[in-house]
Amino acid sequence: MTVITRTPGGTRHKTGAARVRSAAAGTGYHLFSGVLAAIFLLPILWAVLNSVKPAAEANSNPPTLFPHSFSLENYQKLATYGAGLGTYLWNSIALSVLVVVGTVIITVLAGYGFARFQFRGKSLLFGTTLLILMVPYATILIPLFIVLGRLGLTNSVFGLALVLIMFQLPFGVFLMRNSFESIPRELEEAALVDGCGPFGALRYVSLRLVMPGVVTVALFSFIASWNEFLGPLIFLSDGSQYTLPIMLVNLSIGQYGAVDYGAIQAGVVITIVPVLLLYLFLQRFYVSGLVNGALRG
């Protein structure tokens, strides 16, 4: 039977079966979390190990778990593949930076406008923005290709960035509107009384309080643009404009059906590292911003 005792200071202490149940629940939680983390980390570990194997060992059948000898042959092969790893890496970085900057600027301004200003057709415009989420991405690639062609933006990283920004707007605007609505209006009114204009109140007061939401939008747009495959495949035709995902697919095809698994795993590792480091560095802002932005509707 569980016994709860009260100390002279009023603190209640659990004894007996309650402590056993609490310890068992904690152990079970950590065990389950550890197993789940191992399941997610094993493919990454496998890619890292294969990337440092010699090409012959990486392509051997059956595969070896640990490399018999350490080699950077696969990374050297990537460095000289096609237009060069540096070219594909730079294209991916440029695309991701353009998408992140454009998405953050537009969603912050749009979210602030939807949260703070009243205007005719506000609800209709906000609902129309969210309707983009219901449009299948692949179904409008051909119309978008025609539009970009008439604007002279096909085979351009900038034109592709505009397309990806459009598809990041619904989630970003929704999250930023909710983030701004969670801030008391009195804080901005106090800034206005002190001499700030509307943009001054946004810059010096509201924007600092919704920074977790801004980081969340930036992370989502970065991951989406960094891993994007279908858009670059359709809108880019020059090999010097390709991004890392396109390079990896071309590498996996190989000559005469041969697949260089070691080089592919090396490319996977290079693709994973920036996203992993960025997420680990900004995860506390990401979790906070996602929760705060989703609680208000």
Image (spheres, rainbow, N blue to C red):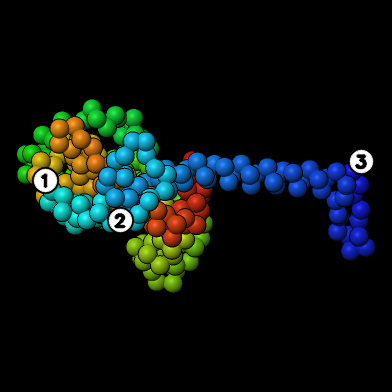
Report crowding for label 3: few under 14, some 14 to 19, many 20 or more residues within 10 A (C-alpha): few
Q: Is mark 2 on a helix, strand or loop?
A: loop
Q: What residue type is labelled 2?
A: Ser
Position of residue 121 relative to residue 99, above or below, is: above
Q: Is residue 290 above or below residue 229?
A: below
Q: Which residue position is annotated with label 1?
A: 239
According to the picture, the residue beneath numbered tag 3 turns out to be 1
Looking at the rendered image, the quarter that the N terminus falls into is: top right
Looking at the rendered image, the disc whose residue lies closer to the viewer, 1 or 3, is 1
Give amino acid for label 1.
Gly
Question: How far from the left and from the top, in percent, is residue 121?
Answer: 33, 38
Pinpoint residue 185: horizontal percent, then vertical percent: 49, 57
To which quarter of the image does residue 205 belong? bottom left
Task: Name the N-terminal-most of marks 2 and 3.
Answer: 3
Residue drawn at x 37%, y 39% is 63
Total count of labels: 3
Mark 1 and mark 2: Cα distance apart in space? 28 Å
Check disc 1 and report its element: helix, strand or loop: helix
Dot 1 or dot 3, earlier in sequence? 3
Say if 197 sits above or below 65 in the image: below
Q: Is residue 278 left or right of residue 20?
A: left
Dot 2, how many residues are within 10 Å of its Cα: few (below 14), some (14-19), or many (20+)? some
Mark 3 element type: loop
Q: Residue furthest top?
A: 139
Residue type highlighted by circle 3: Met
Give the residue displayed 85% in from the left and 43% down from the top.
17
Residue in the image at 31% along x and 34% along y? 132
Q: Distance between the residues labelled 1 and 3?
A: 73 Å
Residue 20 at what x, y percent from top left? Answer: 81, 45
Front of the two marks 1 and 2: 2
